[in-house]
Image (cartoon, rainbow, N blue to C red):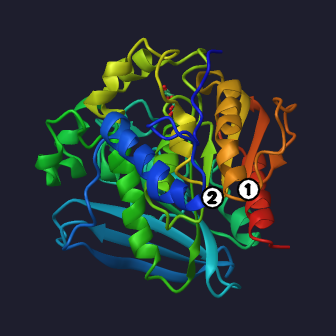
Amino acid sequence: MSMISNPLQLNNGKIVQSKKEWFKKRRPELLDFFTTQVYGQMPDKPANMRFVITEDNNSVFNGLATRKQIKVLFEGTETGQQMSILLYTPNDIKSAPIFLGLNFNGNQAVSDDKNIAITTDWVNSKTKGVINNKATCSTRGIASKQWPLEMILKNGYGVATIYAGDIAPDFKEGYKTGVQTLYPELMNRPDNLSTMGAWAWGLSRAMDYLETDKDVDDKKVIVMGTSRMGKAALWAGATDNRFGMVISNESGAGGAKLYHHVYEEDIAQICRVFPHWFSTNFQQFNHKDTTIPFDQHLMMALIAPRPLLVASAKEGYVCDPYGEFLGAVAVSPVYDFLGKKPLPIQLLPKENEPAFGTLGYYMRSGKHDIFPYDWEQFIAFANLNWNKK
Ligand code: GTR
């Protein structure tokens, strides 16, 4: 693999000398680069945004948890752009740390409970139970294996999830109906608001709500996601330092993977299949995976010194587990420099052998997905970093 850049080297070639210089000079350089060249500009918090709690039920899972459903009205109106947060918090904890992540098919897919509102937004018709891009009742609970809610709650963590398509539908023309419609000034330009940018922005808007909810410890919100939602989680963590911890589960290209490690999906391919995920400027790097002067470790460096876990699956080939490991290795010097525990390993570990510092990595056996094993590792990583148990 050709040389990848030193995250501690400033654009002028000098090496960062102090923590202050990291935060005042290097970090802003990186943030500017990924904003203008990769994921695009992101709008501020909307002035008229308001929250409407549509459900507040403190006796779900036999009294284990409270479930809330919250409409985030971006324009302040019931008819305008909006997303719905599904939030579970454990009843035995005053204000709980929580996992926050986007889901693929609507909040109703996360659990089969009939009280969960079914998304009315566009959903991919390839999903079973989706007819003409609308989710039907038969999509209830189809992703419940990926969201082992009771197990997470019993471990003292809450869960908040949002359907990504409530924010921006996941197809090329999706910007015509997503939150991008609220920001015409950010569209039609080379550093346009991308779908990935919109999703990360939506996660920050969820954080705006979570800051107001007394059942949530807002210093302990872990932004996480699998695959494309893992890419969005990383970018959300990179752009919004209110997120106390970030977990990338098999985020692959555009996530934790280094493009310099050429394997499976490359820049040209991801830009061809999912052009909307990135801003137009990113296309300039098509076919330049091994010569680009940057790589994804520089994006993850924006998350430091906050805990970051990079999770791979051995057979998750599309996400290039070794490329994800190399991404974690490449960002590790930043953790070290900022006085945090770097990645404890230099060689790819065997499967199911987690290696956790403030920066962590593991490679699960099996396919591209999210299993209870993964949640167990997320909880162990959070417990370790937050000195729990
Ligand atoms: C793929 C995409 C991957 C990954 C995956 C997913 O088709 O190219 O980078 O994000 O989708 O989200 O499941």
From the top left corner, tell me how far across and down residue 213 is, in percent. 47, 82
Residue drawn at (65%, 21%) of the image: 317
Q: Which mark is residue 159?
A: none
Q: Position of residue 206 (x, y in %)?
A: 41, 66
Identify which amino acid the numbered label 2 is placed on. Answer: Pro
User: What secondary structure is found at the residue carrying circle 2?
Assistant: loop
Q: Is residue 140 visible?
A: no
Does 175 sit left or right of 64 as displayed?
Answer: left
Residue that carries the numbered disc 2 in the rendered image: 305
- Per the model, the C-alpha gap separating discs 1 and 2 is 8 Å
Residue at 23%, 39% in the rendered image: 192
In the displayed structure, 158 sits above or below 381; it is: below
Residue situated in front as seen by the camera: 357 or 228 = 357
Q: Is residue 269 left or right of residue 75?
A: right
Q: Which residue is mark 1?
A: 358
Above or below residue 386? Residue 295 is: above
Local packing at callout 2 (Cα closer than 10 Å; few below 14, some 14-19, many 20+) is: many
The local crowd at label 1, few if under 14, some if 14 to 19, many if 20 or more residues have their Cα within 10 Å, is many
Residue 322 placement: quadrant:
top right
Q: Does residue 267 show up?
A: yes
As rendered, which of 295 and 268 lies closer to the eye? 295
Quadrant of the image for the N terminus?
top right
